[in-house]
Image (cartoon, rainbow, N blue to C red):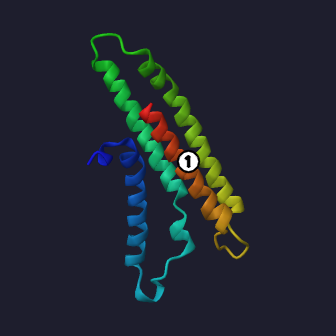
Amino acid sequence: MKFLAQPLFLFFFVPLITVVLTILLKLVCRNDKNFRPKKEDFAVGLDIAVIALVFLIKESANLAHQIMIQTTPAPTATVDKLIVAPWIMLAWVIGILGVALVVRYRGYKDSGELNIWCGIVAPDIVGIAFLFYIIHWISK
């Protein structure tokens, strides 16, 4: 039970479980002729990065709320974390758009099929790295 209370579970495993369930739902919704998984089903990196951005926004709102309800001055670390949050969000959005552009221009073969490396693996690695960064930022 202790594991369930850790930020790693809430901010890493829950999004990954959600993504896996989404892939399974895509498979279940297909007709029997097209039941096999497609490459596009595993291109979830941008989805994970957006989930990480939502976690960042949620944590920033929680920090702002904590500062607002305190009667004593807020700890410097909390205020500093909140000051940096908008810049991280801006960098996040630029990063997500950058990855999307890489997928758009380098992620597809001439046949219109997703390229394994630039279309699936690299965006997935970036999305998971974004998620790990948010876990680190929230837990410090």
Residue 16 position in % (x across, y down): 43, 57
User: In the picture, which quadrant includes the C terminus?
Assistant: top left
Numbered circles on residues, count: 1
Query: For residue 135, which quarter of the picture?
Result: top left
Q: Is residue 9 left or right of residue 49?
A: left
Residue 95 position in % (x across, y down): 61, 44
User: What residue is drawn where x is 62% and y is 54%?
Assistant: 100
Vertical relation: 49 (above or below) 138: below
Residue found farthest to the right: 110
Residue found farthest to the top: 72
The residue carrying pointer 1 sits among few (fewer than 14), some (14 to 19) or many (20 or more) residues within 10 Å by Cα, namely some
User: What residue is drawn where x is 41% and y is 88%?
Assistant: 32
Vertical relation: 90 (above or below) 126: above
Which three-letter amino acid code belongs to the residue tagged 1?
Ala
Which residue is disc 1 drawn over?
Answer: 129
Q: Could you say whether the residue bearing mark 1 is in a helix, strand or loop?
A: helix
Residue 12 position in % (x across, y down): 43, 50
Query: For residue 113, which quarter of the picture?
Result: bottom right
Residue 11 position in % (x across, y down): 40, 46
